[in-house]
Image: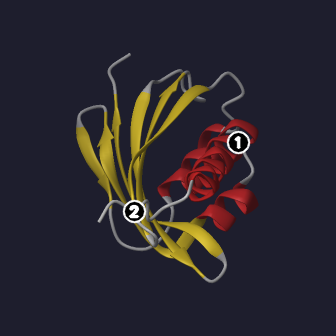
Amino acid sequence: MNRRTVSAEEYNEVINAAARYVEAVRTGNIDMLGEVFHEDCVTYGTVDGKLMGGGKGNPTADFIKNYGPSTKIVSHIDVLDITPTTAIVRIVSEKDAVDSDCNDYLSFIKLDTGWTVIAKVFHQFDK
């Protein structure tokens, strides 16, 4: 069998959801962030070499509350893999609100309301 199971439009929908995440960080829009992340999303990552995150809540929203918008952020989005109901996305970002660079790995699931992030793992690079 040689069938494409995921259309280019589905890829674009996932990229658009990831782009809304970046735009929420760029503008400091916590409401927009809440539209992209599932309320039960789990986040883990390293900041200054230390593990942070876990459990419910949204550390990205906390980051925005603490440091404000990331007006200088530059990013690149890659869809690493996709199925009809799941996707893994890598976002390479430079110059967030604290002038850090990081990689985010977002796990998306497609619900009736569209693509939503159910897990985020990230790495903040040394400044």
Residue 18: where, in percent of width, then height?
A: 58, 49
In the rendered image, the residue lying farthest to the bottom is 112
Q: Is residue 63 left or right of residue 25?
A: left
Which mark identifies residue 36? Answer: none
- The type of residue carrying mark 1 is Glu
Instruction: Mark 2 and mark 1 in contact? Answer it, CB < 8 Å.
Output: no
List x then y, in percent, for residue 81. Answer: 36, 52
Residue 104 in percent (x, y) is at 41, 42
Quarter assignment of residue 39: bottom right
Q: Is residue 31 above or below residue 114?
A: above
Q: Mark number for residue 3?
A: 2
Q: Residues within 10 Å of mark 2 (few under 14, many from 20)?
A: few
- Per the image, label 2 sits on a secondary structure element best described as loop
Nearer to us of marks 2 and 1 is 2
The amino acid type of the residue labelled 2 equals: Arg
Looking at marks 2 and 1 on the same chain, the residue that comes earlier in the sequence is marked by 2
Mark 2 to mark 1 CA distance (whole Å): 34 Å
Q: Which residue carries the number 1 mark?
A: 23
Q: Secondary structure at mark 1?
A: helix
For disc 1, the neighbor class at 10 Å (few under 14, some 14 to 19, many from 20) is: some
Q: Nearer the viewer, residue 21 or 57?
A: 21
